[in-house]
Image (tube, grey):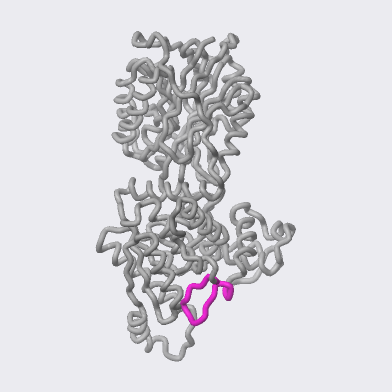
Amino acid sequence: MPTLRVALGQMNPHVGNLPGNIARLGELYDQAEAAGCDLVAFPELAVPGYPSEDLLIRRGFLEDNVEALDRLVTRTGRCVALLGYADDDLAIDSVGGIRTANTVAVASDGVIHGRYQKQRLPNYGVFDEDRYFTEGPEDQPLFRIGGLVVGVSICEDIWYVDGPPTHQSAAGADVLISLHASPFEEGKVAVREALLSDRARRAGIPVVYVNQVGGQDELIFDGASTVVDGDGEVLARAPQFVDDLMIVDLELEPRGLEIALPLVTIEPGAAAPSELPSIDPPTIALELPPDAEVWEALRLGLADYFAKGGFTDACLGLSGGLDSALVAMLAADALGAEHVHAVSMPSQHSSEHSRDDAAALATNLGLDYRTIAIADVYGSFMGELAPSFEGTEADLTEENLQARIRGTLVMALCNKFGWLALATGNKSEFAVGYSTLYGDSNGALAPIGDIYKTRAFQLARWRNQLAVERGDTPPIPTSTIIKAPSAELRPDQRDDQSLPPYDELDVVLERYVDDDFTVEELLESGADPELARWVARLVDRNEFKRRQTPFALRVTRKAFGRDRRMPLTNAYSEVRWAADEVIAD
């Protein structure tokens, strides 16, 4: 029975870093070759990096990525490499725009034997591939490698029951190999494996799934590359969030079906070993528990954003509240505590316990910590504004001014020392506009901007428990977690004076934002009518604020930003329309 030794090169590409990408691909290829692999598969568009976005409409970039591919191909030996790149055989659309093809080169012994081009182009959620790519033809080849017929496809192709892999299996393939750049969201490993198992059972042949890993702007890729057998059982799974080479031996009897697609036969090179080197048995890496999975995704996304952008240090305001504590903890895990600079900026309204909690957290983590009081700065501002504000009552203006002073101080430190500012807002606050533009919303990115407040509490407790299990001191003070959330911008202020309790608010927000419920559907789901309409109004009217806040690391099925694109000047109000309250603003 033939054995096909397959390597899954789960690597972390960097968009546009062509030399770095092909260097890493080359390292993994050499490992696969040394292990006697017949084939090594890498993620979708691994050469240019995914998603390359509008780089893909630049001819120079496309030409350079093909040149990088060619350099990589020249170093190949007997092991067949599946290399994702953007093809330079361009199509021109109806308005003269460039369309490339999302392509896999099948190469060994220094030559490209054939290619496969992605047929199904996702154009939903975070994906807009129809903007850049043209669909591949249906009659693309199968590849005979090591006595077995291999069907190659790319990501979205396998998500359709009647997609290309289904046709490849019917056309005579003995094994299906699918190259992916599948973004992380919580719980997606189980969704993917259910899909792969279904496709394998329908075809009756193994499915090999290789996924990229790492952070690219707001997107995070978790790897978890997987091999399932013809019965849909998982044979091997690579760990999540780790750059990894996984090798699996597939012992298969050729099906011997009549081949109904073009066939490219690739003979092993003369350097083929007489017997395969021994390898460790395949392992099934454990799926991370939900909190650990989300934390590791956020940690990796934050670390890669800094590393790939050439930055080392982060700065944030540390208030003594939960959100800033969680972001500081996350930054320390991602960058190292010595690279995190925390600033306490107490005002006349800051409580003693909040200042103590901020200092305790900084000490527990070993952060660079400083205090810059803002009461005198605030007083100076108010003195200058007094003639203009004469005859008016204090309102949100004075509260927001404090937040903007703090934002300015953080940005001044970042400008002086070359740090990046981290915004500490969460998804609940951003959703309803409970943040200050050019104040606490300042930052290069919002690490927990896709985390609802109730989940933030949960993650804080989990991270403290992890410290206990490691024999360390819980880093986040208990008082930070249990005290009532407050912006402390006026005397005795609490969030629940302006917002519903977070456990009630977040349920409605998740349905309205993530699940796209209508107000009517919210009411049918049992939501309080007043709360449902209030949430809908605030979410809809605060789009302009969210468009100006930093991007959030995406961990849910629908983050603000790429997933959810609403017009800023939008006169539609479902609440008023449904209630026949069509009035002018």
Compared with 368, 497 (above or below) is below
Residue at 29 percent across and 48 percent down: it is 310
Q: Position of residue 187 (x, y in %)?
A: 58, 44
* Furthest residue in direction front, as rendered: 471
Dominant secondary structure, magenta: loop
Viewer-side residue, 363 vs 439: 363
Can you say whether 275 is above or below 300 in the image? Answer: above
Q: Is residue 541 visible?
A: yes
Residue 45, can we see it? no
Which segment is the magenta one? 484-498
* Residue at image point 59% right, 11% down: 255
Pick the residue in front: 522 or 132.
Answer: 522
Does residue 283 sit above or below 167 in this rendering?
below
Which quadrant of the figure contains the C terminus? bottom right
Residue in the foreground of this view, choosing between 466 and 450: 466
Q: Residue at x 31, y 29 (%)?
A: 68
Q: Residue furthest bottom?
A: 391
- Placement of the N terminus among the 4 image quadrants: top right
- The percent position of residue 438, horizontal first and vertical second, equals 40, 68
Residue drawn where x is 50% and y is 17% of the image: 141
